[in-house]
Image (spheres, rainbow, N blue to C red):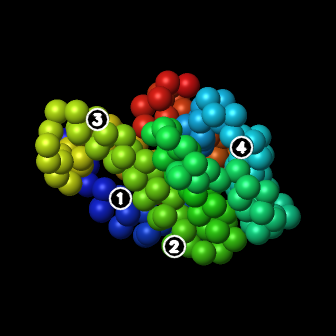
Amino acid sequence: MSHNIASNHQQLRALAAHQQALVATTLVERMLPNYLLFCEVTEFGDGKVLRDALNIVWEKQIVKNLKFNADIQWEKIEPNVPDVEDFDMFGVYPALDTAMALGALLAGIAGDEDAFIDVCKLSEASVGKVVEQELAVDNEEITAQMVEQHELMQYEAEFVAELIKTVSKSPKPDKQVVKSFRQRALADGITNIGIEV
């Protein structure tokens, strides 16, 4: 069954902000190991800074009145954002996408609701780059359709669709719902780009 990414975006936009936040946080949780692996391999950056910021976002969804300053969090993260020019390896792209997705998530929590869609798009972009790299081995020309129909991209679309469907049944996600989403993020044992965790 082919899942349409555009319809995911539409359905995500239709959700309440706190529901969008939960989907977006789950997607970043699923991306984070890509960044941590990059740090490990290159000795660049401090993965703990991103982990701590994401933990605060999870906490904020359970404790609504938790004091939270997105700008301060981003100031801590920014020095840990890799520059693709500095690394001659593919892993810099998913690492950069993870950092930018976390930045978008913080912006969303701070009130920029469009940013939650950006998280979704950054996760898809990460998958897209991996798919294109894989397809380039056998194909001279890669079409958007080939990328969209690739099993990894289909899985990404299905994963997001499932999160949207689940959260739409919880108008006010409580602690248990938030916890279940956090567990769901890496329940399959892989990140969004198929790296085993």
In the rendered structure, find residue 99 and report the number of the disc placed on it.
none
Distance between mark 1 and mark 2 Cα atoms: 14 Å
Answer with left or right where residue 179 lies relative to residue 97: right
Q: Residues within 10 Å of mark 3 (few under 14, many from 20)?
A: few
Tell me which numbered mark, 1 or 4, is placed earlier along the sequence: 1
Mark 1 element type: helix
**Sequence-wise first label, 4 or 2:** 4
Instruction: Name the mark on residue 8.
Output: 1
Residue 183: in sight, yes or no? no
Q: Which disc, if any, is residue 114?
A: 2
Q: Where does residue 93 sit, x and y in percent of width and height?
A: 49, 47
Picture coordinates of residue 126 (x, y %)? 43, 48
Disc 1 or disc 4, which is closer to the eye? 4
Q: Nearer the viewer, residue 83 or 172?
A: 83
Q: Earlier in the sequence, mark 1 or mark 2?
A: 1
Callout in the foreground (4, 2): 4
The quadrant in which the C terminus is found is: top right
Q: Nearer the viewer, residue 120 or 44?
A: 44
Q: Specify which label sits upstream in the sequence, 3 or 4.
A: 4
Q: CA gap, disc 4 to disc 2?
A: 28 Å
Select label 1 or label 2 by which is in front.
Answer: 2
Instruction: Give the residue displayed 20% in from the left and 54% down from the top.
Output: 144
Residue at disc 2, secondary structure? helix
Instruction: Name the amino acid, label 1.
Output: Asn
- Which mark is in front, 3 or 2? 3
As shown in the figure, which amino acid type bears the numbered disc 3? Answer: Glu
Per the model, the C-alpha gap separating discs 3 and 2 is 31 Å
Residue at left offset 23%, top offset 38%: 135
Residue 100 image point, x, y percent: 58, 58
The percent position of residue 142, horizontal first and vertical second, equals: 18, 48
